[in-house]
Image (spheres, rainbow, N blue to C red):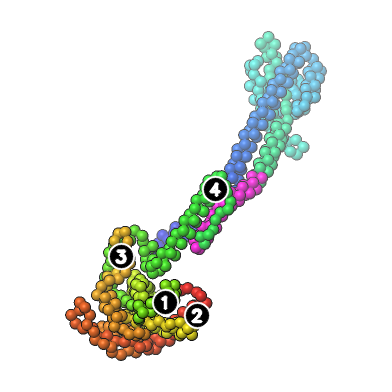
Amino acid sequence: MRILQQIASLPSHASQLWQNLQPRHFPIAYKLALVITLVITLGMSLLGMVVVDNQTRLLRQQMNHFGHALIGQMAETVKEPLLAGDVLALRLAAGGMMRHGGVRGAAIYSDELEPLASEGETPPARHLQQLLGQATDAAIITTMEWESLSQGKDRGMIAFSAPIVVRELIIGYVLLTFDHSQLSQAQRDTLRAVTTATLLMVFLGAVAAIILGQRLSRPINDLMDASLQISQGNYSFRFAERRNDELGTLMQAFNTMSDGLVRKEQVEQVFSRYVSPKVAREVLSDLDQVQLGGQHVEASVLFADIAGFTALSESLTPQQISTLLNDYFGVIAQAAQAYQGHVDKYMGDCAMLVFGVPQADELHTLNAVCCAVLIQRLISELNRQRQADGQIPVHFHVSCNSGIMLAGNMGSHDRMDYTVVGDAVNIASRLSTVAGADQIIISKVMHNLPVLADKLISRKHETIRLRGKQHPVATFEVLDLTEPLRSQLEQHYHHILRQRCSGQAV
């Protein structure tokens, strides 16, 4: 069974091996050069075959015409000496044929195939009878090819034979032998010339193909580099080259796309300033789902508003108030980000922070309380700096609450806001009105949650009645955190202060 399984797995192993052997990246310039080289090679090979074939056929036709003409002339020349029985004249005629270029043998035979005169090389005896026997008609000139061993080399020979006819009566035969090796040599020379030209054209074509391929693929490589730059967030990349072909159109489209991406990034950055970055990412990640409605979630909210803001605003100019709010709300936003929360909205002198939405957070309750302590620590440090500069300090009262609330898009189809609403949110807002300056007030329900057990240093605060609530709400004041939360808070505290000193934004 194991052997059968191994045999069955062989195709998959072979496929995997083939995939591993294949190059992971083969530049398009080399692909184009390879294709062009193969086309040139195939074209030159076909052309060479046609040239060699035509050259061979032409040489053979020329040899046949020459042989037919010469054998016919010889047959007419030897008629009278043959009828007169003049053997000497026949020998002279045979010898005279040897002076023609390419003739390697000449012979004259009687009508009974008896040799009368012979010069040079003639076909072997086993072929001679067959060659002369075919010339039974006065109009027929027969040919025969064979290989002859001459000077230790095999040489191609071709013989032409024709009957000697007098008054439609065959009185004898003439035979001429030609060196066929010249035809073979001409074929080899032609083949060598064509092969040399083919190799030269292939080499030049390959070089030209590589240069052309690199030139054509350069803009494609530029597009690849541009795609890499875009994927890495460098939307400022632009093509400076201007082309009047398809690649130029593609480059222009790429520049237009880059402009659109820059514009999109700018819109996202501006959008992230008007809403929480977390909410912005949630909305932009699925634009098709942007619609009114929400869902019930377990989350926490924090309210931080300025104590005595009405009286404070009367003593400051609008520009001073704007600067003051921006300074304090800036550190509040930094504190929220340090504990996975976000600013839901600014309402005059009040900031509303949310924890646990839109991304779920199991520690949203603990993060909300830690953020409240961090806010008071940062406000205290900011007040110290303002007093050192002779400015009025600002005090905040902070409240937190956790519970079930509705999170989603609220408003209308034309104007909506991602926020949280519900009884837990209302209680947190009401608690901020009973908190004193620099105080952090949470409900007893929140204080007694298991996630906060042994995490807080707190004390009981007032039990208050809230409008719309049947039972009074007991509250606690958070004074500090226990270890190790206190040490973690100190790290966030110093980190934010360093950022503010260096002018960095979180």
Q: Secondary structure at mark 2?
A: helix
Q: Relative to residue 454, is residue 151 depicted above or below?
A: above
Residue nearer the viewer, 206 or 134: 206
Which of the two discs, 3 and 1, sits closer to the camera? 1
> Which residue, given by chain and number where applicable, does mark 2 sit on?
498
Mark closest to the chain's N terminus, 2 or 3: 3
Q: Give the main secondary structure, helix, strand or loop, of the magenta stretch.
A: helix
Q: Amino acid at mark 2?
A: Arg
Q: Secondary structure at mark 3?
A: strand
> Which residue, given by chain and number where applicable, does mark 1 sit on?
316
* Residue drawn at point x = 25 percent, y = 73 percent: 422
Q: Is residue 347 visible?
A: yes
> Which residue, given by chain and number where applicable, does mark 3 sit on?
409
Q: Residues within 10 Å of mark 2 (few under 14, many from 20)?
A: few
Name the spot of residue 267 as percent of width and height, x first: 43, 61
> Which residue, given by chain and number where applicable, does mark 4 sit on?
248
* Gap between marks 2 and 1 measured at Cα: 28 Å
Magenta part of the chain: 204-233
Query: Residue 440 lies in what quarter of the image?
Result: bottom left
User: Circles 4 and 3: CB distance less than 8 Å?
Assistant: no
Task: Locate residue 11 relative to residue 406 in the image: left or right.
Answer: right
Task: Locate residue 30 relative to residue 477 in the image: left or right.
Answer: right
Q: Amino acid at mark 3?
A: Asn
* Gap between marks 3 and 1 measured at Cα: 36 Å
Residue 87: mark: none
* Gap between marks 1 and 4 measured at Cα: 60 Å
